[in-house]
Image: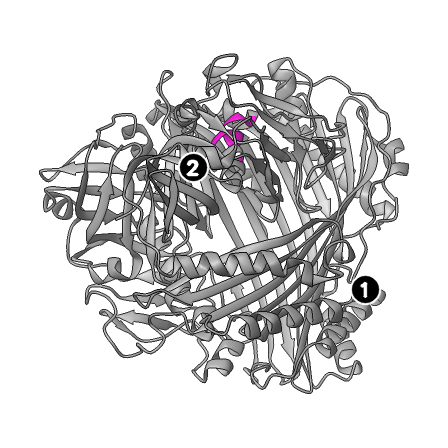
Amino acid sequence: MLTDIITPQAACFADGVQTVLRGHENRSRRVMLLQGNLVQNARSESRGVSARVAKNGAYGFASTALYTAEDARAVLRAATDNAVFLAHRAAAPGVIYPALSANPIPPCRPIVDCEQKRIIDLCHRLDDYLAKTYPNLISRRVIYTEDSQDKIICASDAASGHVTYPRCYLYVFLTAESTSGAPVELFRAFGGYGSFEDHFADETVYYEAIDALYQHLMAKREGVYAEAGEKTVILGGMMGGMLAHEAVGHTVEADLVQGGSVAGPMLHKRVASDLVTLVDFAHTAFGAPTPLPVYLDDEGTPATDAMLIENGILTGYMNSRQSAARYGVAPAGNARAWLYNDEPLIRMRNTCILPGASRLEDMIASIDDGYYLIDSSNGQADLTGEFMFGVSLGYEIKKGKLGRALLDTTVSGVAFDMLRTVDMVSDNITWSSSGFCGKKQPMPVGMGGPEMRCRILIGGR
Amino acid sequence: MVDLKKTSDALCRLAAETGAQGFSATVFTREKQELNTENDQFSLYRTTFDHGAALTVLTEGRKGAASGNDLSDEGLSALAQSAMASAESSQADEANAIAPCQGAHTFHNGPFAPDMPRFYDRLTEFLAAVERDYPRVKLMAMIADHTATHTLYANHNGTAFENFDGVYHVVLEFAGNDGARTTGFHDAAVAFRDLDTPIMALGNVAQALRDAQDSLTTAAIEDKFVGPIIMTPALAQYAAAMLVDVAMSGNVIMAGTSLWRDSIGKAVASDKVTLRLAVDDERLAERDPFTSDGFLSREVKLIEKGVLRSHCLDLYAAGKSGRPVTPNDGATPIMEPGDDSLSDMIASIDCGLLVGGFSGGHPGANGELSGVAKNSFLIRHGKIVGAVNETMISCNLLDLFRSVTAVSREAVCSGDSVFPYVKCEGVTVSGK
C-alpha cells in the first residue's frame, strides 16, 4: 500500500486555483500458457505522483515517477505553471466548478500480493486439466492477469481519501477445428474485484463453467453463418452489458455530448422502450458490491450512482466536475485516471441495464425465426449511437427452440433506434468486468445487463 | 535526475549477482509535453516525467521478467529479486534465450528537446485553418505532444544499445457537423520530427477533414450485394495489422492455428501486394532501431508480390517453432504503392464502397471478418455518390488480400507507416 506523502502537501496548494494531488501505484501480474508452454511470466509495479491544477477553467497537469514529498511539491509547481500558461492564452475563461464536500473517504480493501509461483502453478494445473479432459482441442491458452490500483487523493476543495482497486482474472481460451477445417475459438474469464486468494484458492470450482464452454465450442465447430440482415434476436446478459456500455454509455459521457453526440438534443426525451432503465452504479447495486466498486474519483468527488435512462427517458449524463457545472448538475464521481501520469477523464464505472419481468425460456419460445446471441468478443460505438459488437457465441432460434450454433459474426445498430425495439427484458442480470475500456487511456469497467428481445442488424454471408 | 548509464550498470550487476545465467536489462527516461484541446479551445497542458526499468533473467532454461519505476538502489535490488523469483517459479524451456551479441550502438532520432513556442504556434495555426477551411467540421479533441525518450538496453552477451528519440505527435478526433446533423467519429494521427510543415499538410489530415465534411451527405444502401471495395490507406494499414496477427504472428504460429504456417515461399496474396517492415525509411518519423528482444532491427519483407517471405517471430516463438527470428518489431510497416491512380480505381467500380474505417470483431484464425463500414462512401457508376450509414461488410481477411486487383500510386505517410489505397473484390455489403 502507498505511504501517504500526499496529504501533508495540502499546505502547499496555491491560492486562486483548484488543485488535486494524487499518489498512484499500479501493479500488474501476467502469466500466459500457450499449449502448456509458459510464454509470458512478468511482474510490474509503477508508482508516481501527479497534480492537476485548474485556473479559470484551464487545466495544468504534471507528474513524476519519483515519490517523495519534494517531488510532490515539484509537480504542484509545474502543474500550476502549466495552468497559468494556458489561462493567460485563453480567449475566454472556461467553466469554474463549485467546491464539494470535503469529508474524507475511508480506506477500502487492501491489495494482497501473491507469489508468482502460486500463479504459475495455478495456470499449469488448469492447463493440465484442459489437456487431459479435452484432447481434441487444436489449441488452448490459460492467462492470468492482475491489474490493481492504489491511490491517495487530496483535493483543495473536494473530498480526499485512500482508495484501492484490486482486480485479477483467469482467462481460458479453447480452439477446435470446425467441420470445414478452419479454427473456431471461445473464451471465458473468471475472477474480478479482489486478490488471488479471493478467487483462485480452488480452481476446480470453475470446471463446470469450463465444461459448458467446451460444449458450446463443440456446437460452434459445426456452426453456420448467420443470415445477414435485420433480425429479431435475444441479446444475452453479456451482450446486454456490452450494449449498456458501448451503445449508450459512451454517447452519454458529457465530453462526447459536448462533442456533438446524438444524446445532446435528447435529454429528457424518449430514447428507448419503457422497459429500459440504465444506471452507472458507483459501488453497490442490487444490495451487493458492484464488479468494480468506485468510492472516490480522481477529482475528489465521492462516487454516487448516475441514472442515465429511466423507463426509456434519457435523464442524465456522466460528468466531470467541470462538465457537471456546465450542465448545472452534481457530479457523481466519473472522472478517473489509469496511471499516475494520466489526467482524470470521464469514464463509466459499472454500467447496467436493469432487469425486467420476463423469463428467458418464454423469450426464446416467443421467436419463430431469429437468434440468441450469448456472448461478445468486443464492441465499439460512435457519436451517432451507431454501435457494433462482435458475437463470439450464439444460436439460431427456429420456431421457438434453439437450433444450430453460429460462427463468429457481428451485430450493429443505432442505439436509440434499437432500444425502442426492446419488447421483452429478462428477470436476471449477468455482470462482466474483465475488459478495459479505451479512451486515450485504458480503464477497467464493469458492465451488466439482462437478456433483451429486440430487432438488430446482424452480419453474415 | 536519473543517471541512466549508472542505473543500467547497477541493474546488470544485480542481475548477475542473483546467479542468473543470462539477462537483458532496459532502462529509460521519458519526458512528454502535451497540449490538449477540447472543442477548439486549449484545455490542458500536461507535462510528465517518467522513468522505468525492465529486467529479464534466465536460469537453467527458465525465464522470468519484472519491471518497475523505482530506480533507487533498493528498488533495483527488489526488481532483480522479483525477476529471479519469477524465473525460478517457471519451467525450463529450451526456447528461452537472450539475443546474441549485436555490438554497441548509439542511435539518434528527431529533436530531443521540443520547441514548444513554435509547436504552440503550429497548433494555433492549425486550429484557425480548420475553423476557416472546414466550417462543417467539429474538432472535438486534439492531443499534441512531443515525447523525448532516452533508452539503454544491455544484455549479458555484450549488446549495448543507446537510443535518443524525440518525436512530435498530433492525434485528432472530429466529426462532420452542420448544426443539425453530426457524422460519426473521424480521426487522423501524424508523427513528425520537425515543425517546418503545417500540420494540415501532414499525412492524411486534410483528406480526413474533407471526408468528415463530405460524410454529411449520405447515400442509402437498402439491399445486399457482393462487390469491390477500396480501402483507404488508414484502413489498409489496419487490415495489414490484423493479417499479421491472425496469420503471421508468433502466437498463431506456435499455436498451430495460422493458415499460413507452412506457406513461406508460396503465393498467399495478389501479386500486387508487397508488405515490408521498415527500419530507416527517410519518410518515417518513428524509428525502432532495435527489437524488444535485443536484436538490431533490419528491413523485413513479409509479402513480396504476393509471396509470403516471413512470419513475425520473436526470439521465443522462433525457438519454439524452429524458424528464424524476425529482426523487426513491426512498428513501421510499409505497403508498396502500385501503378493505378485513385481516380481510375474509383472510375472502375460500377457498384462498391470506398471504406475509410472498420468497426468489427477481431477475426479469428480463420480470417472471417464482419463489421460496420465507417467513414465510407458509396461508389455508383464510377463516382462517389455519398456517405453510407448502418452498412455492414463481411469477408475473409486472407481472401481479401488474395483478391486485390489494384493498388494506388498515391500513398499516405503518417509518420509511422506508408500505405496506398487498395482495391479488393468479393466483399459482402449489406444495408439496413
Res. A349 image quadrant: top right
Give yes or no for residue A107 being in the magenta stretch.
Answer: no
The one nearer the camera, B119 or A5, is: A5
Q: Position of residue A451 (x, y in %)?
A: 50, 35
What's the residue type where badge 1 is placed?
Answer: Gly
Q: Is residue A254 above or below residue B55?
A: above
- Which numbered marker is on residue A364? 2
Under tag 1, what secondary structure? helix
Q: Residue at x 81, y 47 (%)?
A: A71
* Front tag of 2 and 1: 2
Spot occupied by residue B401 in the image (x, y as percentages of width and height): 25, 60
What residue range appears in magenta?
A: A245-253
Q: Is residue B426 left or right of residue A233?
A: left
The circle on residue A395 is none
Count how many numbered circles sit on residues in the image.
Answer: 2
Query: Where does label 1 land, which residue?
Result: B75
Classify 10 Å Cα crowding around label 1: few (below 14), some (14-19), many (20 and above): some
A152 or A97, which is in the foreground? A152
Tell me what residue is drawn at x 73 percent, y 83 percent: B20
Q: On what subunit does the disc labeled 1 rest?
A: B
Rendered image quadrant of residue A123: bottom right
Would residue B359 be visible to someone looking at this image? no
